[in-house]
Amino acid sequence: MTAVLDGLTSLFIFAVGLVVLSLIVLFVIDRYQTADTVRRNYPVIGRMRHVLSELGEFFRQYFFAMDREEMPFNRAQRDWVDDASKAKSTNVAFGSTRNLDPVGTPIFVNCPWPTLERDAVKAPPMPIGGGAARIPYDAPSVFNISGMSYGALSTPAVRALSNGAAKAGCWMNTGEGGLSPYHLEGGCDIVFQIGTAKYGVRDEDGNLSDAKLREVAAHEQVRMFELKLSQGAKPGKGGILPAAKVNAEIAEIRGIPEGEASISPNRHTDIGSTEELLDMIAHIREVTGKPVGFKTVIGAYGWLEDLFAKINKRGPQSAPDFITVDSGDGGTGAAPMPLIDNVGLTLREALPMLVDLRDKAGLKDRIRIVASGKLVTPSEVAWALCAGADFTISARGFMFALGCIQAMKCNKNTCPTGITTHDPSLQRGLDPANKAVRVANFVKQMRKEVGVIAHSVGVTNPRGMKRYHVRLVCADGRSRPLDELYPTFVSQAA
């Protein structure tokens, strides 16, 4: 017994000595390093600052932030998506936790005689590319999956989205990273996005390859092509995929070297004017036979007026079949903070502007408008439809449906939910079969609850909503109808 006690005592003394020695080593390192002032002035203790900063993000999210406080998405928004994706009740009790006073808050104007459930219908499909594309697309869903590249997303995440989109009957945008087998796996409709680096459809010199365009278009599931001019979180900056994510498979799909950071040019080098944009759209449509549009963030808008004028000069068949307008507060896997924070108009301003410019040019029936940017709950989607969008898309909403916890680690290959990482040990937690059901549930519940708003304002389906069905809170505290703030849409429609 004495020997055991002596052994434990020696072990304890050794452990204490090891701790003391470690502290002395850390003290010396901190005192003589020059990179961190706090650690130099407060050796060892100063290290706690970094630990607490890391833990602070966790504690704020789970313990201290109120339901409507967090950015970019608050707990109330994330909880709605989570409940919708799990087919749980999205009803809440007692009263709204949303402050309705801030400027820009949408308030839908309920009708005294709302649409009866027996009279309600689903939003009808809408054709895209009719009269211009050899193979037009009859798009069935008002709510769809926005562009998220394979590479930025993991294999199981793309598989789940593909299968979920097929179950829900909506389209899935590939993002600029090319077409992978996992996009095709579920059998859903695909929108192939062509980014500035032309991944997946580029030749050895990085130029657009007609042969590869035809190869992609040969897949019946690929229904449309989208030229990405700019993205909400980084207008004027190309895609950024860290080298750690560029494995052999991603490198082959994109047509780039393995293990090197994938940095796209900040614009299409062969598109520098509205004339060249229309020429490129016509070329891709001729080669593929399918509808072609473009995605952009609106800042300067004079070029749009010029674009529509040139379309009318060339003829309506020269128009893009759709325009996707992204919000200046859109999301991304990686981007410089100044671009994320302060460049590009938000969707609230850009969408009505684009719709009005299109309608003023008499192209309402020719060009479809797709709205993107923080559309993760029914009220946001319903607002976009009221403002004049023909379709809505979401990226981060679907990430939440996959189980994203807003850990803000998308660019570090350390995503704890397996969505934006290529670490097999982290991907293991994401079951594509389970998450595909959640994706489908999210789409179906979104369409259902947007329909509920539509019925409340007195129309039979979401496509019937107009600008006079929603009001926006203004600086004087009063709300004003959207058709009063943006009247051109109504006058053109009349």
Image: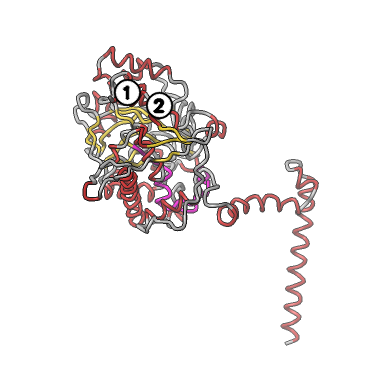
Q: Report if residue 197 is visible in the image.
A: no
**Image height of 440 relative to 362, above or below:** below
Q: What scheme was used to colour the molecule?
A: secondary structure
What's the magenta region? Answer: 392-418
Q: Position of residue 249 (x, y in %)?
A: 38, 43
Dot 2 surroundings within 10 Å: few (below 14), some, or many (20 or more)?
some
Q: Position of residue 411 (x, y in %)?
A: 51, 42
Q: Nearer the viewer, residue 423 or 37?
A: 37
Q: Nearer the viewer, residue 464 or 349?
A: 464
Does residue 413 show up magenta in the picture? yes
* Residue under pointer 2: 486
Q: Which mark is residue 283?
A: none
Q: Quadrant of residue 122?
A: top left
Q: Position of residue 288 (x, y in %)?
A: 24, 28
Dot 1 surroundings within 10 Å: few (below 14), some, or many (20 or more)?
few
Q: Secondary structure at mark 1?
A: helix
User: Which image quarter holds the C terminus?
Assistant: top left
Dot 1 or dot 2: first in sequence order is: 2
Does residue 271 show up magenta in the picture? no
* Residue under pointer 1: 491
Q: Nearer the viewer, residue 312 or 102?
A: 102
Q: Does 92 sit left or right of 101 as displayed?
A: left
Q: Does 171 sit left or right of 30 as displayed?
A: left
Find the distance from the CA under tag 1 to the CA under tag 2: 10 Å
**Image height of 54 relative to 137, above or below:** below
* Residue displayed at 32% across by 47% down: 452
